[in-house]
Amino acid sequence: MTQSIEQKLRAIRQHMADQHLDAFIVPRADEYLGEYVPEHNQRLHWCSDFTGSAGTVIILKDRAAIFTDGRYTIQVRQQVNADFFEFYHLVDTPHVGWLSEQLPAGATVGFDSKVHNLNWYKTSVRTLSEKQINLVAVTQNPIDLSWTDRPTPTQHMGLLLDQKYTGLSSLAKRQQIGAEIAKQGANASFISALDSIAWLLNIRGKDIHCFCVILGSAVLMQDGSMTFFTDLAKIPAGFAEHVGEGVTVLAESQATATYQSLGQQKLTILADPETSNAFSLLTAEKAGATLIAGLDPVATPKACKNSTELNGMQQAHIRDGASEVRFLCWLENEVAQGKLYDEGFLSDKLTTFRASNDLYVELSFDTISAAGSNAAMCHYNHLNGKPATLPMNSIYLVDSGAQYLDGTTDITRTVAIGTPSDEHKKMFTLVLKGHIALAQVKFPVGTNGSQLDVLARQFLWQQGYDYDHGTGHGVGCFLNVHEGPHRIAKNSNGVALQPGMVVSNEPGYYKQDGYGIRCENLVYVADKGLAHDGKKFYQFETLTLVPFDLNLIDTSLLTKNEVNWINNYHAEVKQKISPLLTGADLAWLEQATRHI
Amino acid sequence: MTQSIEQKLRAIRQHMADQHLDAFIVPRADEYLGEYVPEHNQRLHWCSDFTGSAGTVIILKDRAAIFTDGRYTIQVRQQVNADFFEFYHLVDTPHVGWLSEQLPAGATVGFDSKVHNLNWYKTSVRTLSEKQINLVAVTQNPIDLSWTDRPTPTQHMGLLLDQKYTGLSSLAKRQQIGAEIAKQGANASFISALDSIAWLLNIRGKDIHCFCVILGSAVLMQDGSMTFFTDLAKIPAGFAEHVGEGVTVLAESQATATYQSLGQQKLTILADPETSNAFSLLTAEKAGATLIAGLDPVATPKACKNSTELNGMQQAHIRDGASEVRFLCWLENEVAQGKLYDEGFLSDKLTTFRASNDLYVELSFDTISAAGSNAAMCHYNHLNGKPATLPMNSIYLVDSGAQYLDGTTDITRTVAIGTPSDEHKKMFTLVLKGHIALAQVKFPVGTNGSQLDVLARQFLWQQGYDYDHGTGHGVGCFLNVHEGPHRIAKNSNGVALQPGMVVSNEPGYYKQDGYGIRCENLVYVADKGLAHDGKKFYQFETLTLVPFDLNLIDTSLLTKNEVNWINNYHAEVKQKISPLLTGADLAWLEQATRHI
């Protein structure tokens, strides 16, 4: 029987009372602290009905509150029952600060140390202790104790990814990262990010929708040996031979003992306090370990694709580009015949084209298929309500991608449906000019993404426009479609762009209740030999191969250099995609990539 | 009798022995921790002969070492005797880390807590304590005890700056900043930066060459009352009336007792650990004060010029521009007659033009007058050796500025001497294109300088060139020619550009042993009413009014938009400067600002 929110809160509060807790904190994250949370770990959703991708719930004895950001101001009020929850903006009203003002000195706040990172814990314990409020790690999560119809975890068998796709053996990777751990003065490192573990072991999984990883955690020693804690049933035959010497697989229940053992050996452990849960770090530290805070040592090597991975990414983008071209050709013909489909049908159609590709595994994220004014919401999901039908004389935004054995894709195209307005064309062209400026830049060694961000925004800014999201995110190779440590955004993260890093180039413009525009290609950082005074300069090479809609370009706003870039890009698209097409699709591509 | 370095070191080591010190650290800074150090406080120069603007000396019992950065690698070896000093690069070999490796556990290192900031102390005491080395604040500086021919401090009388130049009374400023101190939860703030004190009290001085301040320090209370520690002989008649109620002036020797009293009252004190010396902070803390680390509360209000200050800056730039134009006209005529002067003569000539201006006080920094390949050194000073004579068919770089009662100027022009080469023209044009891109940008509220920096570099980068300095620094109003908290540079400091902030726009290019190019104007941040979705956009308005040398521009590299910018700028220069010129100067200006 499904429990109501009222029943759920009552059950949770009973368990809180049993544990003498005055409050309990429920973040969206689970013990893997990733961007995606598998269904059986969606504790915040279960107790509140909120489906957004960021938020925190605090349950007190007789009240509860939910904290979300500006993206979800409307959605949270639609999904969450105001009879049981108060609503707060998590930036204006940080949840721990709020909590410290609600409770008297001496109160006890419970938290599950497995679902918070170490940085959160350290900051929160300080804030609460200033008011003499105790922050106590629970041994049994009141949500888990109350969740009677909790889904069982997935049981998908892991996949051993061939070295022809990874370019490097697990052993070689582990030894390389082990040496880096030693260089940083540590004996071992916690490897918590699921994509880091998958990359290190050259394995993939299906435990999270669109995210090809196996749930688990790991410890990597400086000699490259590794202990992987996971559901043993997911380890396929041939695993030991595949990963090479030095890998031990244990059940997740064994992890605590291992953390304690590391501490008892007085080891120094490198751990990323942002990506590692507080439980593992505190357990090891309590047992005697010394912690060094640092970036996940796998993050940068994983981000800098080797030549095999880059080649795979290029091949995947040729196949993926052909599917997107088939879809755009089909769409144009249907619209020309007056057939205006809804967003869901369009999304499914595009997936059908993609799914027929060689080496296709699954989508890399839920397609954003946004008609007319829906595209003004950057993260629109047509499944959240009734999918809209394409209006005539509008623009359609489709942001989509796939996981292939040899690479990951992520592309946004914005296309005219019928006849676009002058405003549509002007704004599309301003966005495209920014895309081109970023695509063409050359930059010295040491440059980070935030230094380049303005190039994509400058033409919008010049007329008083902007977009409220980053310009580019890292992308994995048959891995997470959002990966670090680099990015291109207004805020600096100080990580220099290095050869082999894949990043999206996706400026946009969103007019509320009007329309949305985004021009997104994936690119990678390349060293093409440019240097001056011994200092190297890098540049981007484009991976994505799909025409931009010429019907949306106002050429009067373009410089000769920009026109040349478009013509050169389209010539490359035609050259690489044509061999995969025939008939009407091929004719459409030739027209779509015509010289302007 | 002048002491030799050997004699000086012997004397210092005797005082170190008396104080049981195994090492003594001598930074370049004095107790005011500013960019400029008055002659009587140049301890590092006195004990080493090094004249550079950054460095540290460490004196051990039988060795000494000097740590400098990449700018001074050559100069330090020319100036400092290798018989007595070892040379290190301060980035590759941080001085405290080096020291910790030279001394045994139990050793004692002396430092003068008045000449180091708190951050340095906290970091250093941690590094040294890891090796069980003691860091001890001396009560008598061994340098001061050894310095027999120390210059006496200057005795210039302070100047009361009229409100027609400041726009705001001292009382109003102090109350405004006092409220900000209260808002940050503090009872008081140490105001250590000399320009912050001068701005708060609407006074100026001549205690440091080019830097119109009075030496001293201050404490500002949250009610706006202020205690100023300085040489009482510098306080002019009418001071009390000028500054208004609530200002107490005490001798510097009284400061320690005041710091202790603040502590005894258990006050919470806001202090900038980068600009405040360790002595004042540690004294107050030891006596019971609670310190809050934060940016100097005067920095941002001082940087955001009010309308009176902006008007003054504009007026100063008109007069200053006319002098620079007279100089450039004179220079062109002399060169045309085959008269090629040396850098020193040119610098003095330019100063003569400036010094005749109304409201002129002094130069705002030592003029960089660099002929031919000397300009390849960004911070070249012709007084460090024999000034070079202008070569024919070269380019000359002159970076100069002045302090006027109503404002401060800082301009660099690079001009052709004879016939420039195609390379000169190409590189000048690439630099100018960057200058124009930055001059024209519009940007949303919240944007900081590091986000804009690439605009000035992009055209150089595209061809594999760069310049190894920031793009822009803040500038005071009849105050420091380098001021914070904002800047335009590769490294982010997170400070948003706000209306009224003055900043330089000075991209350059330097070819080693070849030539140097820099195009520098001062600009200020203006709100011209552009907004979108309720978000304001700002832009720069140019203050500097002097033509760029059209002989150095390769118009084939310019876009139509860039040509328009140059023509519009030159039209404005002509319109505003012409009224101050006559005869040949006026004719020169008309030719120099002709439409291209």
Image (tube, coloured by chain):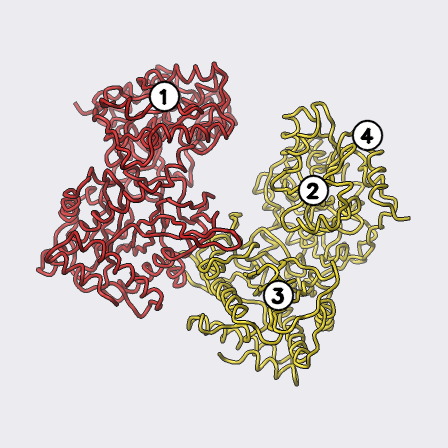
Chain colours: A red, B yellow
**As drawn, B226 above or below A8:** below
**Which of A45/A266 is in front?**
A266
Q: What residue does disc 2 label? A: B87
**As drawn, A180 above or below B319:** above
Relative placement, left or right, of B42 versus A3 is right
**Which of B107/A67 is in front?**
B107
Check disc 4 and give the amino acid type: Gln
Distance from label 4 to label 3 (Cα)?
49 Å
Q: Secondary structure at mark 2?
A: strand
Q: What residue does disc 3 label? A: B411
Question: What label sits on residue A246 in the rendered view?
Answer: 1
Distance from label 2 to label 1 (Cα)?
47 Å
Q: Chain of mark 2?
A: B
Q: Chain of mark 4?
A: B
- Image position, residue B186 (x, y; %): 61, 39
Check disc 1 and give the amino acid type: Gly
